[in-house]
Image (cartoon, rainbow, N blue to C red):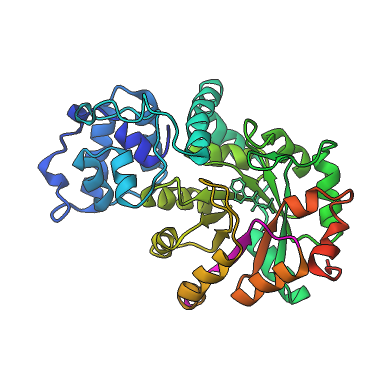
Amino acid sequence: MESLLAASFSLPAAAFSPPSSLSSTSSSPHALRSAVAGAARAVRCSAAKDSILYALEHDEMFNSAEVIQWESGKSINSIAAAQGIRIRRRCRPRYPSEGSGADKAVPRNMLEQIIWDKEVEVSQRKAKKPLQKVIESSQHAPPARDFVGALTAAYSRNVAPALIAEVKKASPSRGVLREDFNPVEIAQSYEKNGAACLSILTDEKHFQGSFENLETVRNSGVKCPLLCKEFVIDIWQIYYARSKGADAILLIAAVLPDLDIKYMLRICKNLGMTALIEVHDERELDRVLKIDGVQLIGINNRSLETFKVDTSNTKTLLEKRGDLIRDKGILVVGESGLFTPDDVAYVQNAGVSAILVGESLVKQENPGQAIAGLYGKDLLH
Ligand SMILES: O=P(O)(O)OC[C@@H](O)[C@@H](O)c1c[nH]c2ccccc12
């Protein structure tokens, strides 16, 4: 796994007795970087090594705080748990002192199940197409479109939350939403009826989506910026999404420790992509608000652990943190469970600039025409 934390915690502890120059108070960033590079070169696990060396060579973020975490010998699961993250990772090698960890456990909820399946899927995909190859493909993709720009333009055009319309065939909570599913037709009809951006689900196992859907929509002449709706656990997926034409990608705070979010944000920025960082509760929101460079936060009204939907979640979180969010110039997307003009007005009054809607559109015979029903008016292009 190529995320920075994943890579670092794949290292055997013995490979990681850094020189004393690595102490956070005494070393310069340069000394840190070269010490870390030295340690990385000594590592036998090639995926971890590639990832670290790649990060260093491409001037990815590496600071003393991370090295301290790295040095601490804590597993990603215990670091994540300390940040309030309940979702455990399974496939990452552990420190010997950690015992059997999550290996023999059963998943505690659907999100954990999805993440464990995703770990297997990503490692299989990477075996077929290693990180370097996928980075090369991403460099040949047409440039990323301005996701945030499209949202703000649509907001001022309509004086209503900009629409991110979702191309979604099925979900674990709702089953198949649309039998006759043609992603390009749905995307074109959303665009024609005023969607600012589109969200394309790419998870196959639980949502019946695919990266092929993302790619065909991107190549179909649709101009709206595209969000890759994926369960990202590894930077490989970000480069892959870009190589298939994504302009933005979802990062879920319930799954990713702060350090992974920071690292992934940096990669998105380098690729010209926008990260939509999804939160569901106050603790996740507070974590994300401490991270620099966040432009877009999604408040999911649906818990991915219990699937309970509660639209007042957006309102409650914005009552608590709306001022800080505005001061930071962050745009908020209200996500899930929106069906009527009243729902849209409710989240608009709560302070969102955009909404992310799947089910209530995709279930209608003509998903594009359903947009006017959702807003109670036609949207301008
Ligand atoms: O179909 P709905 O209730 O309108 O929801 C859309 C979107 O918010 C939802 O699909 C979603 C939000 N966050 C996610 C993360 C993964 C998968 C799916 C999602």
Res 25 seen here: yes
Residue 181 lies in what quarter of the image? Answer: top right
Left or right, 248 with respect to 277, comes to right
- x and y, in percent, of residue 87 in the image: 42, 42
Res 221 seen here: no
Left or right, 118 with respect to 190, comes to left
- x and y, in percent, of residue 148 in the image: 63, 63
Left or right, 198 with respect to 371, comes to left
Q: Which residue shows up at 67% across the image and 38% down it? A: 244
Left or right, 104 with respect to 366, comes to left
Q: Which residue shows up at 59% across the image and 42% down it? A: 230
Residue 28 inside the magenta-drawn segment = no
Highlighted range, magenta: 327-339
Quadrant location of the C terminus?
A: bottom right
Q: Which of 58 and 169 is in front in this view?
A: 169
Quadrant location of the N terminus?
A: top left
